[in-house]
Amino acid sequence: MLGHKLNWALLGGLAIVGALLAIGIGSSDRVAAGSCGAGCKSDYNQCRISTKGSPSCEIAFTRCMQSCIVGK
């Protein structure tokens, strides 16, 4: 009986460790995507300033953001 409870406790502990690792990996992906997106936003702002609001900035921003998503 004690061995059976110990096995369940071990399995539960492993599940918790696995979940924490998954959360950590997911968090690092979000951080990378967030910093990529921040770079896109910065580039977009600079483009808007230097071109006085050219529509090409919107296109470049969209492509940049898409590359952040695909680049994960």
Image (spheres, rainbow, N blue to C red):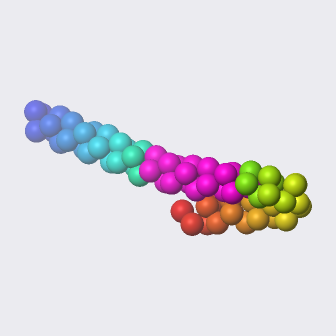
Is 39 in the magenta? yes
Residue at the spot x=28%, y=39% of the render? 12
Is 71 in the magenta? no
Compare residues 57 and 4 and report the one nearer the observer. 57
Compare residues 49 and 62 and report the one nearer the observer. 49
Residue 43 vertical position relative to residue 20 in the rendered view, above or below: below
Q: Residue at the left extreme?
A: 2
Residue at the spot x=42%, y=45% of the render? 23
SS majority, magenta: helix
Residue at the spot x=41%, y=52% of the render? 25
Where residue 34 sits: x, y (%)? Answer: 57, 49
Q: Horizontally, is 27 left or right of 67 in the view?
A: left
Which quarter of the rendering shows the N terminus?
top left
Which quarter of the rendering shows the C terminus?
bottom right
Does residue 15 show up? no
Range drawn in magenta: 27-44
Where residue 31 sits: x, y (%)? Answer: 50, 48
Compare residues 44 and 36 and report the one nearer the observer. 44
